[in-house]
Structure formats: C-alpha cells, structure tokens
Amino acid sequence: MKPATCNPTPKPAARSPEPTKPPIGATVPVKYRYDELTWPETRAAIARQPVVLLPFGTVEDHGPHLPINTDNVIVEAICLEAARRALADLGSD
C-alpha cells in the first residue's frame, strides 16, 4: 500500500465572481425597489444613502368596479415615476 501524499500546492480560496460590466453604450435597467434587489445590491444602494420613498395607501372600498388596493397602486406609481425623474435630473437616465 502506498503512503498518502500531500499536494504541495494549495488550491486557491474560492472567491465571489467579479461583477461584469455592461458593454460600452449598453443601457442597464435601473431598479428602484429594494425588494427587487439582491442583498449585495441592497448593501450598495444603502451605502449611496439614497432618498427612500415608502409608498403606502389605504385599503378601502372604491365601489364594485375597483379593487381595494387602488390607493396603493396609485401611490406606488407616483413613487416609481418620482424615482425615474430624479435619476433623469441627475443625468443617470
């Protein structure tokens, strides 16, 4: 039986893959919602100290023709549009 041999060159430690950059001229969709970000993206967003909007509305009856979350749908759309316009004003859009 052969004695066990030790590999003299250790394997490099596993590391997270380098982020890939989009090609020059490519547009990258901007995510405005924290719930759509991964945890590393959320950490990076928090580090930039952005203004955070918390959309909320009431859940109430709007008659038989509208859902009860109508106010929430409206305020969420307003916040998303405000975020889009703010980025455009900064030249990021």
Image: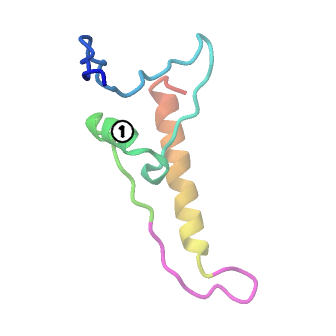
Residue 33 or 70: which is nearer the viewer?
A: 33
Which residue is found at the position 52% from the left and 30% from the top? Answer: 88
Q: Which residue type does callout 1 highlight?
A: Pro
Left or right: where does residue 13 sit relative to residue 17? left
Q: Assign the C terminus to one quadrant of the image.
A: top right
Q: Check disc 1 and report the residue beneath it.
A: 40
- Magenta highlight on residue 58: yes
Up the image or down, 18 lies above or below 33; here it is above
44 and 57: which is toward the camera: 44
- In the image, taking residue 2 as reference, residue 85 lies left or right, namely right
Which of these two is toward me, 26 or 50? 26
> Is 42 one of the magenta-colored residues?
no
Does the magenta stretch mainly form a helix, a strand or a loop? loop
Rendering coords of residue 56 (x, y %): 44, 68
Q: Which residues are magenta?
A: 56-67
- Please tell me which residue is depicted at 50% across the width and 46% down the height of the picture: 82
Give the image quarter of residue 61. bottom right
What is the quadrant of residue 39 in the picture? top left
Q: Residue 46: percent from the left, percent from the top?
A: 29, 41
Residue 1 at x, y = what percent?
31, 25
Q: Is residue 9 left or right of residue 84?
A: left
- Residue 32 placement (x, y as % from top left): 48, 44
